[in-house]
Image: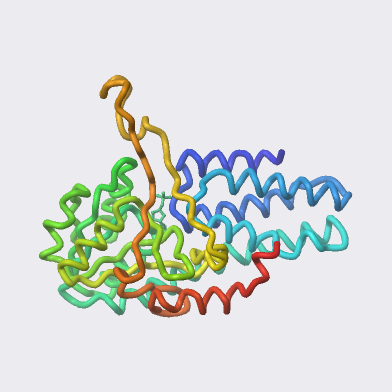
Amino acid sequence: MDQNVVSISQDIRDMKIRGAGRIARAGADAMGKFAEGYQGKDMAAFRKDLDEAVGVILGSRPTAVSLWNGVQSSISGAKSAGSVDEAKGIITANSARFIAESNEAVHRIAQIGAKRIEDGDTIVTHCNSSVAIGVITEAHRQGKDIKVYATESRPWRQGILTVNDLSKAGVDTTLIIDSAVRLVMKKVDKVFVGADTITSHGALVNKIGTSQVALAAKEARVQFYTCSETYKFSPISLEGDLVKIEEREVSEVVRPGEIPADVKVYNPVFDVTPAQYIDGIVTELGLISPGSVYDILQRKFGTEIMKE
Ligand code: RI2
């Protein structure tokens, strides 16, 4: 097995590479490196080895469809190539294109989303979304006077990354524990979060606790936005497939011996926020409603990607 593929997949599994966009780009990069380093000339063997490499990468984290889309976009058309060299060329070009378009999408979303933030706004963000942070820091860069409450995001505490990012950008930032969200919501104007997956019926799958933030926002009549590149839209959800919610180790929640051995620990990493809690999805194609996800999936992916 290609060592780049093995090590990138391990880094994704261990959360050394994390965040739905970053893992998508890492998955695409792994496919590009696999193609560059492939030595054989037999197409049948290449197809088999490619399938194995794809399986290793996709097995690293199950929830974010961005990883699946990054990998599938990178290998699109390669298996029907006339030779291994042609297939390798297709994959390296696809991979580079995906990574460039992904970075460009993050930039576009920052420009579009920042317009929804007004001078004097107080914002809540949850976990660590590079895309949501891009929107917030762009609004700040434009000179808008904003305040941000960032949740700690147990158990991995990605909120610590967020407050570091925001502070570095000069944004007035306050860290709160996850359970303080409803209390602070009274002082909040807008919520901006990221996305791991968005389904064809507009439900948002994001870091555990996102749906509680959305619930508190709805109750307080606070606008709730998710910032999502369209490769986080799930083509397989069109066929009714459920998004697999990743469960991680008990050790992420409690230290050994801290609780009685007969107490079970349940550590789901993501939850689902239904479309009716979402005021808008900021994508690189524009600000859309959750009801438009189906159309974009059809327009962007058609049925092609599902046949790979
Ligand atoms: P960006 C993260 O998942 C968070 O749930 C975050 O909202 C989402 O990915 C999107 O991140 P994890 O990898 O692509 O921390 O916006 O489990 O950076």
Residue toward you, 234 or 264 = 264
In screen coordinates, is 83 left or right of 194? right
Residue in the picture at 36% in, 53% down: 271
Task: Report the number of numbered marks.
Answer: 0
**Image quadrant in which you'd find residue 150:** bottom left
Residue 78: where, in percent of width, then height?
A: 76, 61
Which quarter of the rendered picture does the N terminus lie within? top right
Residue 221: where, in percent of width, then height?
A: 17, 72
146 relative to 26, above or below: below
In screen coordinates, is 303 left or right of 276? right
Residue 256: where, in percent of width, then height?
A: 32, 22
Residue in the picture at 44% in, 70% down: 201
241 relative to 291, above or below: above
Residue toward you, 63 or 37 = 63
Residue 243: where, in percent of width, then height?
A: 48, 55
Visual colour scheme = rainbow
In screen coordinates, is 142 left or right of 85? left
Residue in the picture at 28% in, 75% down: 142
Residue toward you, 232 or 294 = 294
Quadrant observed for ligand 1 in the rendered image:
bottom left
Which quarter of the rendered picture does the C terminus lie within? bottom right
Residue in the picture at 58% in, 56% down: 68
146 relative to 271, above or below: below
